[in-house]
Image (tube, rainbow, N blue to C red):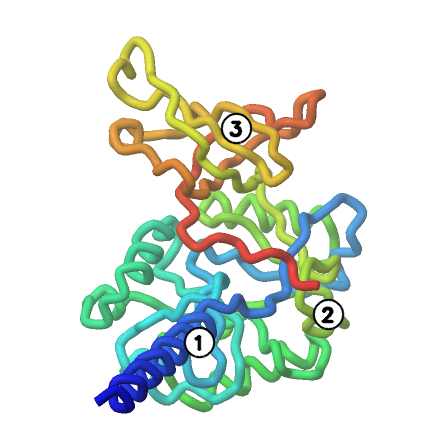
Amino acid sequence: MKTCAVRLLLLIGLLLVATQAAHAQESVSPRLMLAKSYTDGTAVSEFWISEKMDGVRGRWDGRQLHTRGGHLITPPRWFTAGWPSTSMDGELWMGRGRFDTTSGLVRAGNSRDPAWQRVRFMVFDLPDDPGNFDARVIAMRSLLQEPGVAWLQPVPQFRLPSAQALDARLKQVVAKGGEGLMLHHRHAHYRAGRSDALLKLKPYADAEAKVVSHLPGKGKYQGKMGALLVELADGRRFRLGSGFTDAQRARPPPVGSDVTYRYNGLTRSGLPRFARFIRVRHDRTPPDPR
């Protein structure tokens, strides 16, 4: 009896270790190429340009989809049926201004939700392809044409001759409800981490911070959240009190969550100027790969 009990305990222990290992494997963040911000003086003609999709970033490893934080995404089986076994970096996208809907669908994990029929996976890179971005643009177009899957598409890539043309295109995209533009250097190879070869251009700057506490409102916001006290990665804190709907003030982002905010430059002390809340960041940005 004692021997059987020992064997049973060993078996349970092995199963627990295997389960923990499986969960750990699922939550490992993919090694992604990450963008820096566009700066004046960039040689625009040397870059491929695309619209910055306001969706949920996904990494297809040839078998499964993962978020940028490494969490498994569970779409319907039909959604990924026929996809190539090639690793793909892209965006789960439902259209301009639909980030919250897309994010909620992905986080819910309900593969039976009919909303998946409105999702597209917009591919903007091939992480394992050894060619430069010139070659990868051609490879993406060829790779995704063959399966003939309507919701699996390459992000349209185009070239512009100058910073003036880039500024004009940015204004067009924003006027139509878009978020901004991405620039990818034509000679760049896929390298994990922040890169000068991948740039983002928006009409405003944005960043992320952690919610430390809810500060009470006054006047018309009596009994609701008036502002969030948030903390930057370096430990500095500031009040984030603009950009919230009444519903968000009644049910503010929880303490400990990450939020994205927009701002216009920095104060003399280096804190964001005119910061406004954009959204809760449910999938935390992984640390830059080293």
Residue shown at 43% from the left, 23% from the top: 241
Q: Which residue is mark 1?
A: 21
Left or right: where 282 falls relative to 79: right
Position of 264 relative to 125 (above/below): above
Residue projecting furthest to the front: 2
Of tags 2 and 3, which is closer to the observer? 3
Q: Which residue is mark 3?
A: 275
Percent x, y for residue 52?
53, 56
Residue shown at 40% from the left, 65% from the top: 92
SS of the residue under disc 3: loop
Q: Nearer the viewer, residue 251 or 273?
A: 251
Give the alpha-carbon distance from disc 2 to disc 3, as whole Å: 34 Å
Under mark 2, the amino acid is Arg
Q: Give the label on residue 264, or none.
A: none
Badge 2 or badge 3: first in the primary sequence = 2
Badge 1 or badge 2: first in the primary sequence = 1
Of tags 3 and 1, which is closer to the observer? 1
Give the alpha-carbon distance from disc 3 to disc 1, as whole Å: 41 Å
Under mark 1, the amino acid is Ala
Q: Which residue is mark 2?
A: 186
Q: Quadrant of the C terminus?
A: bottom right
Percent x, y for residue 57?
47, 63
Residue shown at 47% from the left, 49% from the top: 178
Badge 3 or badge 1: first in the primary sequence = 1
Position of 246 relative to 142 (above/below): above
Position of 37 relative to 25 (above/below): above
The answer to whether any part of residue 150 appears in the image is no
Under mark 3, the amino acid is Ala
